[in-house]
Every structure is written in structure tokens, then in C-alpha cells.
Image (cartoon, grey):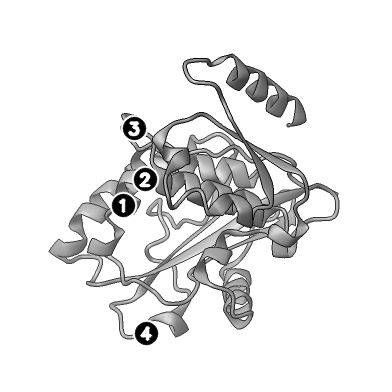
């Protein structure tokens, strides 16, 4: 049996959707959705006849004193495909500004789980997954993991650290590199399930940063740095990774 990846994220509004404060977000919504629809590995998203899901009534129990909630519910071919969209392009630009429009939540607001291929999850399913995630007592970062509902028929074997560069691709970003490592670890069942992983990087500031290095022992991996000024070992590594897809 084959599976698709479902994901839901819920945002609590700092102001009404029609307010001037939310105007920049609403103006960018169609563009972001169109970029997602065209993304590699995208399968489906919940929407009304308006072309988005802002009018969808769900998660009413999670308003928590906000001006309401909006829900994003989609399916993808893989964790990597979802990460490639989330950490790039217009979506990344909007995500960096989210504190202007949405409350910062102390609990998990995003969940991922595997569904039978072609299945379209309902908002009731999504609410159950978020409740289940919160009930486990895991930190919000664990909400990015689909490993708690890993399919038996297929398991991802590679995870590209997509999005380690900023939206303008002018410089690498260590925070996104850290998130990529955490996602790869979580997708494989957590650090306790990983043995003998090789983490191959170059010698850029992203991978020698003080907040990136602690992520390596946590993943129980063997760091391998490429030689200065040489791209050939990276090319070999990329070719090897592609053969595992």
C-alpha cells in the first residue's frame, strides 16, 4: 500500500481578516497558494470556491481569545516535497512576517500524518491529529514529524536539507539548516532510531555555527566536511543521494 503525506497548520489571527493589519497577508495569499499548487510533489489543498480556505469553519475550539483561526490543509508526495515549498520562495517570505498577523502559540499548531494514496483528509481528521499531538506533551517542533504515523508500505530514505538558503539565495541560513536536520531526524523516528548516519556538508558558516553543531550529536551522525575550494566530493554525495530516491 502506498501513502501520501497530509499536513495541517492552524493560525490564530491577531486581527480580523478584513482589517488593515491583515491586508498584506490577504494580498499575498493567492500568489502563495498558486506557488504551492505548482510546487513539485504537491497533490491537493483544502479550499472553497474563493480559491483559499479562509472561510472554512474548523478548529473553533482553538480560538483562544484571538480574532479567529484559519486552517491550511494539504497533501504531498513526501516530507521532502513539503519542506522544499515551505522553506523557499514567496511562502518563506510570508512565513518570516507571520508575527505581524498571527499569535505565537505555546502548543503545537502543525501536524503531519500519512494517509492512503489519493485520500483527501477532512478538517475533523486534522483536528484529531492536532489534539493527539498536543496530548502527547511533545514540543511544537515535533509537530513537523510524520514519523509518529509512519506508513508500513513505504518509508522515506533520504531527506534533502531544502531551504538552507534564504529566499533571495544570497547567503545560507543556519536556522533553516538546523530545521532541516531536525526534520530529517524526526522523519526517521527520532534520534533514538538513527544509527550510522553520515551528515555531509561544506565548510560554510552555516554548518560551523554554534547553534548548528549541537544538532549533530543529537542526530547520532558522523559529520563529514568537504575540502575547501572543492565541489567534487559534494557532487559525488549528491549523485549517491539521488540514487536512493
Quadrant of the image occupied by residue 126 = bottom right
Q: Could you tell whether 114 is left or right of 53 in the image?
A: right
Q: Which sits earlier in the primary sequence, circle 2 or circle 4?
A: 4
Q: Please report contact status of discs 2 and 1: CB closer than 8 Å, yes or no.
A: yes
Q: Earlier in the sequence, mark 3 or mark 2?
A: 2
SS label for mark 2: helix
Label whose residue precedes the other's in the sequence (4 or 3): 4
Of 117 and 232, nearer the camera is: 232
Front residue of 62 and 17: 62
Residue picked out by circle 1: 96
> Mark 4 = which residue?
64
Give 110 or 123, whichever is nearer the viewer.
110
Location of residue 117 with respect to 114 vertically, above or below: above
Quadrant assignment for the C terminus = top right
Picture residue at 70% right of the left edge, 55% below the top? 119
What residue is shown at x 58% (from left), y 40% (from top)?
81
Disc 3: which residue: 171
Reading the image, the residue beneath label 2 is 92
Amino acid at each position: 500500500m502506498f501513502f501520501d503525506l497530509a499536513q495541517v497548520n492552524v493560525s490564530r489571527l491577531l486581527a480580523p481578516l478584513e482589517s488593515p493589519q491583515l491586508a498584506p497577508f490577504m494580498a499575498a495569499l493567492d500568489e502563495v497558494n498558486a506557488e504551492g499548487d505548482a510546487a513539485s510533489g504537491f497533490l491537493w489543498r483544502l479550499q472553497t470556491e474563493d480559491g483559499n480556505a479562509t472561510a472554512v469553519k474548523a478548529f473553533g475550539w482553538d480560538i483562544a481569545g484571538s480574532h479567529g483561526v484559519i486552517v491550511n490543509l494539504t497533501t504531498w508526495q513526501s516530507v521532502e516535497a513539503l519542506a522544499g515549498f515551505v522553506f523557499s520562495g514567496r511562502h518563506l517570505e510570508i512565513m518570516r512576517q507571520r508575527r505581524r498577523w498571527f499569535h505565537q502559540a505555546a502548543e503545537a499548531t502543525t501536524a503531519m500524518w500519512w494517509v492512503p494514496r489519493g485520500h483527501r483528509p477532512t478538517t475533523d481528521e486534522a483536528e484529531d491529529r492536532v489534539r493527539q499531538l498536543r496530548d502527547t506533551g511533545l514540543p511544537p517542533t515535533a509537530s513537523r514529524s510524520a514519523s509518529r504515523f509512519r506508513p508500513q508500505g513505504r518509508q522515506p530514505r533520504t531527506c534533502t536539507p531544502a531551504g538552507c538558503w534564504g529566499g533571495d539565495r544570497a547567503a545560507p541560513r543556519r536556522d533553516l539548516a538546523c530545521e532541516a536536520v531536525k526534520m530529517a531526524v524526526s522523519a526517521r523516528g527520532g534520534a533514538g532510531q538513527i544509527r550510522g548516519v553520515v551528515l555531509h556538508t561544506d565548510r560554510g558558516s552555516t554548518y560551523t555555527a554554534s547553534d548548528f553543531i549541537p544538532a549533530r550529536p543529537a542526530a547520532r551522525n558522523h559529520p563529514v566536511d568537504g575540502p575547501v575550494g572543492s565541489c567534487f566530493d559534494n557532487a559525488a554525495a549528491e549523485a549517491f543521494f539521488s540514487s536512493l530516491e
